[in-house]
Image (cartoon, grey):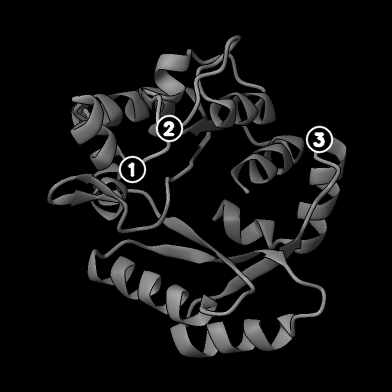
Amino acid sequence: MTAGLAITLRKMGTDVGVMKPFAAGIKQKKGFKSEDVEILANSANVDDSEELLNPQFFPISASPYTAWKKLKIKPKIPLILSSFKKLSKKHEMMLVEGMGGTMTPILKNYFITDLIKDMKIPTIIVTRSKVGTVNHTIMTVKMCQKYKIPIKGIIINNFDKGYPIDQLKKDLEGLTGIKVLGSIPFIKDMSDKSLYTIFKKNIDMKSVLK
């Protein structure tokens, strides 16, 4: 999702920077440690250092909190915020990719919501068209509101063609009061041209830019 937004914004003429504060998983043998971070960097076509784009990488598939406990690598919040500040000065707009959901733990009493608030940025909630979506989205909205995090909108990702997507949009907007910016189908062709065409057609990019 973040890569698609980055490509679209770039092709629309916006100098967009990208960041993934925490990444986890199997370390790549070449290039960036994280495949996700490499995809983001290529999508935005930036030459920023890996240390800024992804200040912390954990070589296991786990939340920062779990990685800390298992690997004894403590998440460094000041480093994350400092890296974000440096990137923000270099680019017209920043896209920060999360990890898990709003309550993904970073430290014992510090979650993704705390990081978003400390960065002083708005959020876009990405959800899916499956059983439990409405419940999960409402809880995410409520948590962001509790933390006083501005919400730009909701994007429905990987929607099923057989799912009543129009009804889901109405339900989400009616129940949360948050605008649905659009919906993205499952994408096989991940080329820049394909992503740009799909995102430009299906997402309210003007609201993303606000």
Give the structural element (helix, strand or loop) at label 1.
loop
Lower sequence index among marks 2 and 3: 2
Give the structural element (helix, strand or loop) at label 3.
helix
Judge from the rendering whether residue 96 lies leftward or rightward of residue 76; answer left or right.
right
Kindly identify which numbered label has been placed on residue 130: none
User: How dense is the environment of label 1, judged by Cα within 10 Å: few (below 14), some, or many (20 and up)?
Assistant: some
Vertical placement of 53 versus 61: above or below?
above
Q: Separation of disc 1 and disc 3 at Cα?
A: 29 Å
- Residue depicted at x 67% and y 56%: 205
Q: Residue furthest front?
A: 70
Give the structural element (helix, strand or loop) at label 2.
strand
Q: Position of residue 64 (x, y in %)?
A: 29, 38
Q: What amino acid is at disc 3?
A: Asp
Residue beneath label 2, please? 24
- Quarter where residue 192 is shown: top right
Q: Position of residue 142 (x, y in %)?
A: 32, 75
Lower sequence index among marks 2 and 1: 2
Q: Are marks 2 and 1 in contact (CB under 8 Å)?
A: yes
- Quarter where residue 70 is shown: top left
Q: What amino acid is at disc 2?
A: Ala
Vertical placement of 119 versus 56: above or below?
below
Q: Separation of disc 2 and disc 3 at Cα?
A: 25 Å
Q: Comparing marks 1 and 3, which lies closer to the viewer?
A: 1
Q: How many marks?
A: 3
Q: What amino acid is at disc 1?
A: Ser
Residue beneath label 1, please? 63
Q: Position of residue 20 (x, y in %)?
A: 45, 34
- Residue depicted at x 52% and y 90%: 174
Lower sequence index among marks 1 and 3: 1
Judge from the rendering whether residue 149 lies leftward or rightward of residue 136; answer left or right.
left
Depth order, front residue of 188/121:
188
